Image: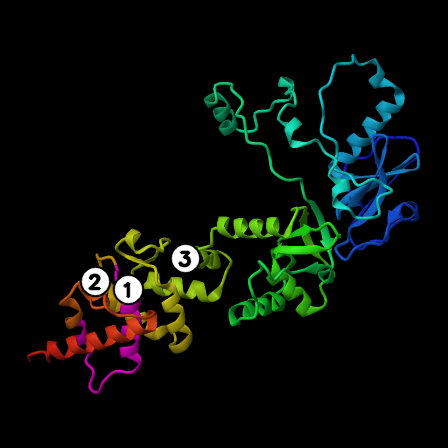
Amino acid sequence: MMTSAPLPPSLSVQSWINKGTNPIPDWAQTRMIGRREANGTFMIHTRAGLDKVQARVLVGHIVIERKGILYTRPGGEARGLLEELDEKDSGAYAALPSTPRGPTATADHAPREDVTDDITRRLGGIVPQSAAKLPIDPARKTTASSRTAGQATAASGALKKWPIAKGNPPSIENRHPSELNLDDSYQRSTDNGASQALIKKIANGWDWRMCLPLVVSKRDDGSLWVLDGQHRLAAAILRGDIPFLPCVIGVYGSVADEAAMFVAMNRARKPMNRLDDFHAAIASGDSEAIEIAKLITDAGFTVSRRTGSQSWVAGEVAFTSAISKVLRKHGATVCQLALRTMQEAWPDEVLNAGSSMFTALTKLAVNPPDDFDHDRMFRALLKRDQKEWASFLNEVKGGGEERALALRRVLLMAYEEEGEAQP
């Protein structure tokens, strides 16, 4: 049952709402193009003014049949469409004064007779050069927000002259994975462990809500080449049950242009840092991230949002990855002991050697020397501040594991020097 307001009593009107799986009425099927897609949408023949065009009926949109012509609109716009058509039929528009018009942009519709799927035939909109010259009707200006109004005031009424937009607008299409190709001349190889693991992860946890459109180039011969999204493509092929992939398809001119765009897109992309990812995981309800955050806060620290060591402040923990590794291997108790030891030893200091110190302390807890005395170790820790402990790692080459092992050896030497407590 449709929940929109009753449609006006236009002549010979039928309407139906697309719920994705409900039966399509006969009067709509006669004007369909092809069949209904797996996502519930389908194409119909319709009109834009006097032009015969094609339109896609989205899930939740209404299909209206009026005088033998189909139209599709969101539910809230259907009534307005019919009122507009009724006014045109009644000749009400003829009484309006005519005003000279400048060039206007045409709608990006595929001609009804176009069955070639040639992208260049659908890019019939206004050219960028003339777009900058379009007249602006002051009556159509809106104050969308106070920020917009403020920006307009700051501009002193002068219009900014933007550089001419490059290229042509792309088309948005769903394409079967078998139609998409990869060019090895500029694409990165996926024949490595990290890429294969990512492909399997995407395939195993396929979620349409995370499947952003692939960036695709359409060459002169009609073939399609993926610039961005090769891991999603590989995952779809690996699964074998993905009927299509959403694609943003553009014309780039040559393979060299494709390669240049590939480089530009990858250089412009700002990767998500690990702490942003960690906080996002907490927000999404990830159980491990939530447990790590609780271990940190229970010890008296807070989780940092800064990955650069120069921006760390006292009382913050940035080594969530190190905690995650120990938590998975040895459990929460070992993590809790190391974090509380660090908080008690250096409550007001920046943890310059935080990751290495945490891992070294957990190694001592898991595999302590004979007759290991925790109080003696704690007294040794108090003899130096974090900067001094970090200085022992200046000459250490290698990653986090090598640095942690080196600091463990230093801690044991400090432990021996400390000596037993006098009675």
Q: Which of marks 2 and 3 precedes in the sequence?
A: 3
Instruction: Name the residue located 54 percent from the left edge and 50 percent from the top edge.
Output: 265
Closer to the camera, 135 or 87?
135
Q: Earlier in the sequence, mark 1 or mark 2?
A: 1
**What is the magenta range?**
351-378
- Give the residue drawn at x 48%, y 59%: 281
Mark 1 touching mark 2, by CB under 8 A? Answer: yes
- Image x and y of residue 261, in percent: 57, 49
Q: Which mark is residue 354?
A: 1
Residue 59 placement, left or right of 340: right
* Camera-nearest residue between 225 and 300: 225
Q: CA distance from mark 3 to mark 1?
A: 15 Å
In the figure, is residue 229 to the left or right of 146? right
Q: Amino acid at mark 3?
A: Leu
- Residue located beneath label 3 in the image: 275
Which residue appears at 49% of the width and 29% of the height? 147
In this figure, which residue is indicated by the disc labeled 2?
386
Task: Tell me: residue 115, above or below residue 340.
Answer: above
Q: Secondary structure at mark 1?
A: helix
Name of the residue lying farthest toward the left: 423
Q: Main secondary structure of the magenta part?
A: helix
| Separation (CA) of disc 1 from disc 2 | 8 Å
Q: Position of residue 86 (x, y in %)?
A: 86, 26
Instruction: Identify the image quadrant of residue 314.
Output: bottom left
